[in-house]
Amino acid sequence: MKTNLKYKNSVFSLIFSNPDILRELYSALKGISLPDDVPVVINTLEDALFMDKINDISFEIGGRLVVLIEHQSTINPNIALRLLMYIARIYEKIVDDNNIYSTKKIYIPQPEFYVLYNGKAPCPDEMTVKLSDTFKNLEPLGLPENTKPVLELEVKVLNINEGKNEAIVQRCRHLAHYSAFVGKVREYENQGNNLKRAVKKAVVYCRDHDIMKELLQRNSSEVFNMLMVEWNWDDAIKVWHKEGREEGIEAVAKNALSEGASVEFVKKITGLDIDTIKRLDKQC
């Protein structure tokens, strides 16, 4: 059975899919106030895939800056390489019909790269991941190491769990709310609730306490389904490594179905056909 997993929606991407909210987020990350009249244009890739996962957020600011932000619950040592691939595709979109072989210089926006981390594993408040750290050494070739790599890409990783990088989080209301929501789910899990129950209790708590209230009122079932898929993702990746890709995708589908996700939603996030999903649903 051939599957075609196109993307994994995330609550984070849903929250930060608005130019004004991205303006607020970027201002918080940089500790500045981005003027209201500076245009923010979203240009997130729709088909740049790594392990069939779409990149999270990409946007231009004033046509002079392009910012890529990934949200992760696991530390990925290959993130700089992934973002190198993403930024190349984004520059293709930006340049579009301009002839890169012409004698006229083409100016492109400067890039910035961020990862916002909220996983359970320990992570410092801030760290930098460099592309050059993944380069193979030249010693076996009898060549000296390059002290200054001719190609470099640096990613700033920021821990956004509750109690981490509070100055940044508090400068962006939406980021603070997202962090609080995730913290509440984990609090309920630590009290002995299973994930499904913990998420449902967190949704009720946050709606009652004006945390992500508008989003949860409009999309509570969608948010719930997204979270059930997101937080089973790491388990699926482990299955991919142990048993193969298709088994991992089916594991995501079964977990989502067992937690109440609809057949249509599972089809959307896995690319599995309806008959396969119904068969898996019977196994739950």
Image (cartoon, helix red, strand yellow):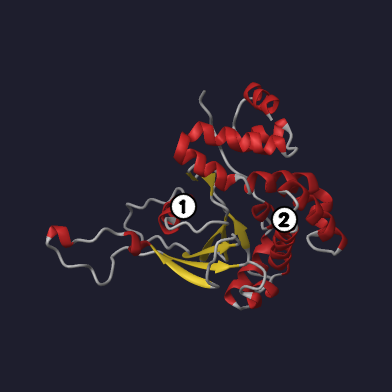
Q: Disc 1 or disc 2, which is closer to the eye?
A: 2
Q: Secondary structure at mark 2?
A: helix
| Residue 78, image quadrant | bottom left
Residue placed most toward the observer, 39 or 241: 241
Tell me, yes or no, whether the two marked residues, 1 and 2, touch with CB atoms within 8 Å: no
Q: Quadrant of residue 41?
A: bottom right
Report the number of discs.
2
Query: Which image quarter: residue 259?
Result: top right
Residue 45 against residue 258 in the figure, above or below = below
The C terminus is located in which quarter? top right
Mark number displayed over residue 86: 1
Q: Residue at x 25, y 72 (%)?
A: 147
Q: Is residue 138 above or below residue 49?
A: below
Residue corresponding to mark 2: 189
SS for callout 1: helix
Amino acid carrying mark 2 in the image = Glu
> What residue lies at 78% left-to-right and 60% top-to-bottom?
212
Q: Residue at x 87, y 60 (%)?
A: 208
Identified by mark 1, the residue type is: Tyr
Q: Residues within 10 Å of mark 2 (few under 14, many from 20)?
A: some
Query: Which of the two residues, 277 or 58, is positioned nearer the viewer here?
Result: 277
Between 172 and 87, the one lying in front of the other is 172
Kindly identify which numbered label has been placed on residue 21: none
Query: Closer to the N terminus: mark 1 or mark 2?
Result: 1
Q: Position of residue 252 (x, y in %)?
A: 61, 38
Residue 246 screen position, x and y as percent: 51, 31
- On the question of residue 33 being in view, the answer is no
